[in-house]
Amino acid sequence: MHSSYVIRRLLQIIPLFLAVMVLVFLLVHLIPGDPVSTLLGDRATPDIVARANRELGLDKPLIVQFGLFVNQVLHGNLGESINLKVPVLRLIADRLPITLFLTVYAALLGVLMAVPLAVLAAVRRNTWVDAVIRAVFQVGLSLPVFYVALQLLTLLGARLGWFPIGGYGETFGDHLYHLFLPALTLGLNLAAVLVRTLRSAVIEVLTAEYVEFARAKGMSARVILSRHVLRNALISTVTLLGLNIGALIGGAVITETVFAIPGVGRLMVDAIFGRDYPVIQGLTLTFAVLVSLVFLVTDLVHARLDPRAELT
């Protein structure tokens, strides 16, 4: 039913992809310094620097470099890392699963925290319970991600020793254990956003006529909540969740750096400091495609939950 819509949305990613290619190419060349000086250091002679620039194609005019970059991408090649001497696609393929694992983990923690607390705040609205929940998450929303990450790392990791302060682990259980603090950092930020929206949605649904009718029929509060209230309240929250999952992927850049996680976020930071142009360009294009796909899935899930929604 939605196949034509999916194909149309996938085709719309192409011009976005081209626009991001132009933008990221221009932006990376605005970064102060150059990759050759960073790679060779201050003691390199002018001859060595010139030869390195020729080998990397950095001595060519900017428009020629852009043409070569586009040609590479169209042939499914994102180039080779200047610093690591490894194909960018291989670097991304090795590290992207770690970041996706962290993103899904953080989203699950955020939803698991947000849904029961938002429902509790809505059911007990205008009481001290509602006030405490809203106040806590309002404070959480105002705190920067890196500050929350450092506090959790210091308290639960360094002082109490309950969780590792870095790394990824070897097995699935290790991954859950090692990534708990970074996932909690991102999950708390997500929960703070979702609680506010979901609480308002639940309150609105609780006052709807069909909910009053269900109460008049003698349905229990638990059945009304699970069968009528949550399903309808979650419709508006799904879109917000999709938008914030895109933000979680971006937030991984900070979190992976603080917790020394070898994902694409940390790879991006290393690439920026090392002026590794191919890696920066490849990662930015990957982020753009991922976020576009997340938005597409969000629209499909929204349409699935709400049959009144039209996919246009």
Image (cartoon, grey):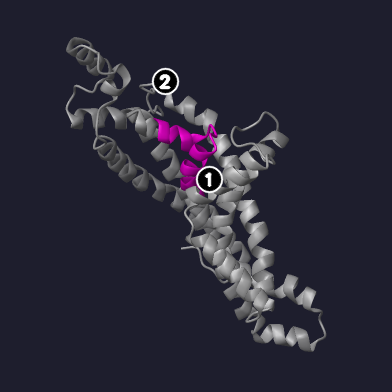
Q: Which mark is residue 150?
A: 1
Q: CA distance from mark 2 to mark 1?
A: 29 Å
Q: Residue 206 is drawn in which quadrant?
A: bottom right
Percent position of residue 86, x then y: 44, 20
Residue, disc 2: 84
Q: Which badge, 2 or 1, is on the more N-terminal residue?
A: 2
Residue 74 visible in the shown view: no
Tell me which segment is drawn in magenta.
Answer: 248-270
Side (left or right) of 212 relative to 30:
right
Viewer-nearest of labels 2 and 1?
1
Asked if the magenta segment contains residue 254, the reply would be yes
The secondary structure making up most of the magenta span is helix
Percent position of residue 78, x then y: 39, 28
Question: Crowding at label 1, few (<14), some or many (≥20) Cα neighbours within 10 Å?
Answer: some
Q: Residue 79 is drawn in which quadrant?
A: top left
Q: Residue furthest bottom?
A: 216
Residue 252 visible in the shown view: yes
Q: Secondary structure at mark 1?
A: helix
Percent position of residue 187, x then y: 59, 53
User: Toward the viewer: 153 or 53?
Assistant: 153
At 67% from the left and 67% from the top, the residue drawn is: 117
Side (left or right) of 78 relative to 234:
left
Percent position of residue 272, x then y: 36, 34
At 72% from the left and 36% from the top, the residue drawn is: 173
Residue type marked 1: Leu
- Tag 2 and tag 1, C-beta contact below 8 Å: no
Q: Residue furthest front?
A: 159
